[in-house]
Image: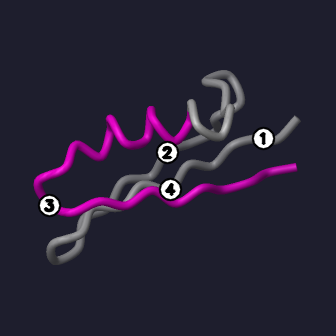
Amino acid sequence: MKRTKLVYGNRNEDIEAKVQETMRKYHIRQEDVIEIRYSEKDSTKNALIIYNSR
């Protein structure tokens, strides 16, 4: 089953570091990740992690 997790931060935060922190927090393994989509709008950075749940 595919699942998603949304990670967001402000403009001066490292969104990639927050993605790695979220993956550790929710026990998402790298081999389960299908795609990570990044976007930036106004003063907010977003990342959507799409992964297979076990």
In the rendered image, which quarter contains the C terminus? top right
> Does 31 appear above or below 42?
above
Q: Residue at x 64, y 34 (%)?
A: 33
Amino acid type of the residue that numbered disc 3 sits on in the rendered structure? Arg
Magenta run includes residue 9: yes
Residue 1: x %, y % from top left: 88, 49
Q: Which mark is residue 36?
A: 2
Q: Which comes sooner in the sequence, label 4 or label 3? A: 3
Q: Residue at x 11, y 54 (%)?
A: 12
Q: Which mark is residue 48?
A: 4
Task: State the CA–CA distance, disc 4 to disc 3.
Answer: 16 Å
SS under mark 4: strand
Q: Which mark is residue 38?
A: none
Residue 16: x %, y % from top left: 32, 38
Task: State the CA–CA distance, disc 1 to disc 2.
Answer: 12 Å
Residue carrying label 3: 11
Q: Is residue 42 left or right of residue 34?
A: left
Residue carrying label 1: 52
> Does 22 appear above or below 7?
above
Amino acid type of the residue that numbered disc 4 sits on in the rendered structure? Leu
Q: Which residues are magenta?
A: 1-23
For this orientation, the residue located farthest to the bottom is 42
Task: State the CA–CA distance, disc 1 to disc 3.
Answer: 29 Å
Task: State the CA–CA distance, disc 4 to disc 1.
Answer: 13 Å
